[in-house]
C-alpha cells in the first residue's frame, strides 16, 4: 500500500510539473543536457542536473527546473528526504513559484509528513488556486491523514477545475 500511495503522489507531482513547465514555456527544444531532456537513466539525469546546478549558472528558472527534476528523480528512487532538500533549494531561489511548494508537498506526503505537505499545498493554492493538481494532491493527503471530508471536498474541486484530471492520473499508470 505504501508503494501505491507513493506512486500516486509521484504521479500527481510529475503530471503537474510537466503541465506547469510546458505552460510556462520553460521547456526549450534546443536543450541537449539530459537533465532537461530526460535522456538516459535516472542516475544519468540526476548527475546531469547536479552538474548543471554546480555549473555556476545564474538562470534561476533553469536552476529551479534542475532542482525540480532532481527532486522527481530522487522521489522515484525512494529518497524523499533528498527530494525535500532539492525543493527547499528551489524555494530559496524563488519563493514565489507555487509549483515549488507543490513538489515539496509531494515529497512530504510520500514521507507521510502530512502536516508539512498540507502547509505547502495551502501555500501553493494561496498563490494560484486555478490548478486542479494542487487540490488533487491535497485531497489525497487529507484522506491519507484520516480527514476524508476535507479530502473529498478537495478531490471534487480538482475535478471541477480540471475535468478529466483523474483520467490523466490513470494514464500515468497510477491508481
Image (cartoon, helix red, strand yellow):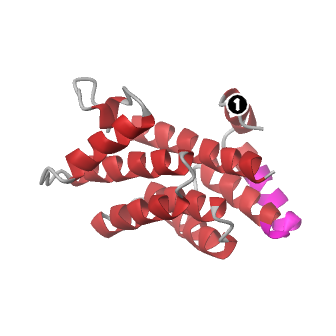
Question: Does the magenta portion include 146?
Answer: yes
Q: How many marks?
A: 1
Residue drawn where x is 54% and y is 59% of the image: 80
Residue 95 vs residue 54: left or right?
A: right
Give the quarter of the figure containing the C terminus: top right
The correct choice, above or below, for 40 with respect to 26 in the image is above
Q: Nearer the viewer, residue 70 or 91?
A: 70
Hey, which quadrant is residue 44 in on the image?
top left
Disc 1 target residue: 173
SS class of the residue under badge 1? Answer: loop
Residue 8 locus on image (x, y percent): 70, 46
Query: Which residue is found at the position 77% from the left and 52% from the top?
Result: 155
When the figure is inspected, residue 109 is found, relative to residue 68, above or below; the finding is below
**159 relative to 91 in the view: left or right:** right
User: Magenta includes 59?
Assistant: no
The answer to whether residue 128 of the structure is visible from this angle is: no
The residue closer to the viewer here, 27 or 162, is: 27
Residue 164: x and y in percent read: 72, 33
136 and 75: which is toward the camera = 75
How crowded is the residue under tag 1: few (<14 C-alpha within 10 Å), some, or many (20+)? few
Q: Is residue 136 visible?
A: yes
What residue is at 60 percent from the left and 47 percent from the top? 10
Q: Main secondary structure of the magenta part?
A: helix
Q: How far from the left and from the top, in percent, is residue 49?
A: 30, 44
Which stretch is magenta? 145-157
Amino acid at each position: 500500500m505504501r508503494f501505491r500511495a507513493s506512486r500516486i503522489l509521484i504521479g500527481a507531482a510529475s503530471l503537474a510539473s510537466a503541465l506547469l513547465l510546458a505552460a510556462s514555456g520553460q521547456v526549450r527544444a534546443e536543450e541537449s543536457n539530459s537533465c532537461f531532456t530526460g535522456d538516459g537513466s535516472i542516475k544519468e539525469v540526476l548527475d546531469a542536473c547536479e552538474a548543471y546546478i554546480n555549473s555556476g549558472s545564474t538562470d534561476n528558472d533553469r536552476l529551479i527546473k534542475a532542482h525540480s527534476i532532481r527532486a522527481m528523480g530522487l522521489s522515484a528512487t525512494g529518497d524523499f528526504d533528498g527530494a525535500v532538500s532539492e525543493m527547499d533549494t528551489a524555494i530559496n531561489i524563488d519563493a514565489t513559484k507555487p509549483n515549488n511548494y507543490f513538489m515539496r508537498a509531494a515529497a512530504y506526503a510520500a514521507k507521510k509528513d502530512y502536516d508539512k505537505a498540507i502547509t505547502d499545498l495551502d501555500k501553493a493554492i494561496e498563490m494560484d488556486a486555478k490548478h486542479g493538481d494542487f487540490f488533487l494532491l491535497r485531497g489525497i493527503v487529507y484522506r491519507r491523514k484520516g480527514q476524508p471530508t476535507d479530502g473529498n471536498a478537495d478531490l471534487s474541486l480538482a475535478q471541477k477545475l480540471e475535468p478529466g484530471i483523474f483520467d490523466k492520473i490513470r494514464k500515468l499508470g497510477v491508481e
